[in-house]
Image (tube, rainbow, N blue to C red):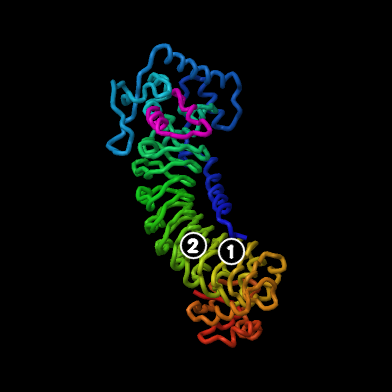
Amino acid sequence: MLHLCVPVCLALAAQYVSGVSSRSLYPSIFTPYPPLFSAIGAAQDKIMAGVPVPLARHAAVVAVLVLAAAHGALCGHVEFAVARGSNANAPSLPPVANVTGAAAAPSSLVGCGCGPAPAPWAFLNAKLQALWPVIQAFKKTITCDPLGVTSTWEGPELCSSYFNGTKYKGFYCDYPPNANTTLTVASIDFNGFGLCAPSLTGFIDQFPDLALFHANSNNFSGDVPDLTHLPFFYELDLSNNNFSGSFPDTVVPLGNLLFLDLRFNRYAGAVPPPVFALTVEALFLNNNGFDGRIPDSFGSTGAKYLVVANNQFTGPIPRSIYNTSATLSEVLFLNNRLSGCLPYEIGLVEGLAVFDAGGNEIAGPIPLSFGCLRDAEEINLAGNQLYGQVPDVVCLLAKNGKLQNLSLSENFFHSVGYHCMELVRSRVLDVRRNCILGFPDQRPAIECAAFYADPSKHCPFIPHIPCDLPGYHHPAAKAAATVPALPAPAVEHGHGHRPQPQGQGGGN
């Protein structure tokens, strides 16, 4: 069943990230770097094509870099830095003597244990030369490094990984669209490094060609830097860190963002409506302290994967969800404090494969429109206040669609449709802890009676099915006559409007 968000959320994130890991860091743009030496150029071309590089040619690459480093050590060094603008949170970088083609380096880096600043010609280009002091300044702010990755951040080989080297772990290079002959840092991936630093400001915002920043499972905190001046930036993963406060307002203006992961932090408060208007394909906000209503702008999202689970959201699932029909594939609302009636409009999201709203306070029958979710593989509505009959139109999705898991435990359903019985026997359908007479592990009759006697929990029934279902005929009158009776206490003590038994429950 879908009761645990952690593995599901991790799987969704991994599913998305794995889809981008095999492509160029700058999508659809890739131009090989023209070789300065034939050996280096040939090695690069084969690495790019996935062909093993002959040992001799690989040795040539290493030899050039080693000779460059040795020459820098023998001939002295010049210090370089990158201009940091007027950001008050950035580390202070006092200027020293400037050198053609690069900013001057801060004297504070001398003797910092980072090694001498390489000579200008030791770098592949001026872009990498300018990024060296940025990395060294950030290295000084790191207070824990359990894997020792920062020990590799030495020397001029910022693009070592591009040549299958081991220097500068976490930094990956590519050719930017506006300078497709100049190799530079395009991606920073610190996933799982366990690094501790009080701020990322003055670091990732100083990489002008950065496209991706992944920092899952570290101990970063502070404010999220303003990245709006980075023209190629499209992926931000700050999950499983120590960020707190309100939703980071610097994220909202990132119009080109395709992937945003803020899960497992300590953010709180409302999520601004523009967040759901971002052009993201994947949006993970789960396992924080976000609260308030999910805004109606939810329907504006273009996300394929959207997770807001394990927060403190209240109010109903926005009916605007029907606007996501062209894009939304997997959405997780579980373990919040959502209430209101289960929206009929969910059944209009035709491409929905996973819908999880378990562990909330959502009421009503299951709308018949759910029978139109032919691509649905998993539906979790466990742990709510749903009632009526489990409709056959939904259970038929296991036969006519892709349904593999239907979790409806811990609700107040009083009966199941004919085809649902097959799913109960095959354990595709879980109806434990409901009010179904003759079924094992159900609620006490008095508890069911009290629920059905409370008119405040009732929602309207909408009999319409907004699609053609093969082999299904809506036997409303016949079904109503064959619905099993409710437990006697529910009839004897009922004093308000009691939900009328429908052959197929639905509602809004």
Residue 203 vs residue 423: left or right? left
| Pointer 2 local density, CA inside 10 Å: few below 14, some 14–19, many at least 20 | many
219 or 485: nearer the eye? Answer: 219
Residue 379 is labelled as 1
Q: Is-magenta flag for residue 142?
A: yes
Range covered by the magenta-colored residues: 131-157
Q: Is residue 391 visible?
A: no
Q: Nearer the viewer, mark 2 or mark 1?
A: 2
Where in the figure is residue 275, as x and y percent of width and height? Answer: 40, 55
Front-most of 103 and 162? 103
On residue 129, the disc is none
- Decide which of 327, 241 is in the foreground and name it: 241
**Residues marked 2 and 1 touching at CB (< 8 Å):** no
The residue at 70%/77% (across/down) is 438
Q: Position of residue 285 (x, y in %)?
A: 46, 54
Would you place residue 498 above or below residue 121 in this image?
below
Q: Amino acid at mark 2?
A: Asn
Choose between 158 and 272: the one closer to the eye: 272
- In this rendering, is residue 41 above or below 390? above
Q: Residue at x 41, y 64 (%)?
A: 293
Identify the residue under disc 2. 336
Q: Residue furthest top?
A: 74
Depicted 156 relative to depicted 338: above or below: above
Q: Earlier in the sequence, mark 2 or mark 1?
A: 2
- Residue 281 forms part of the magenta stretch: no
Task: Check disc 1 and give the amino acid type.
Answer: Ile
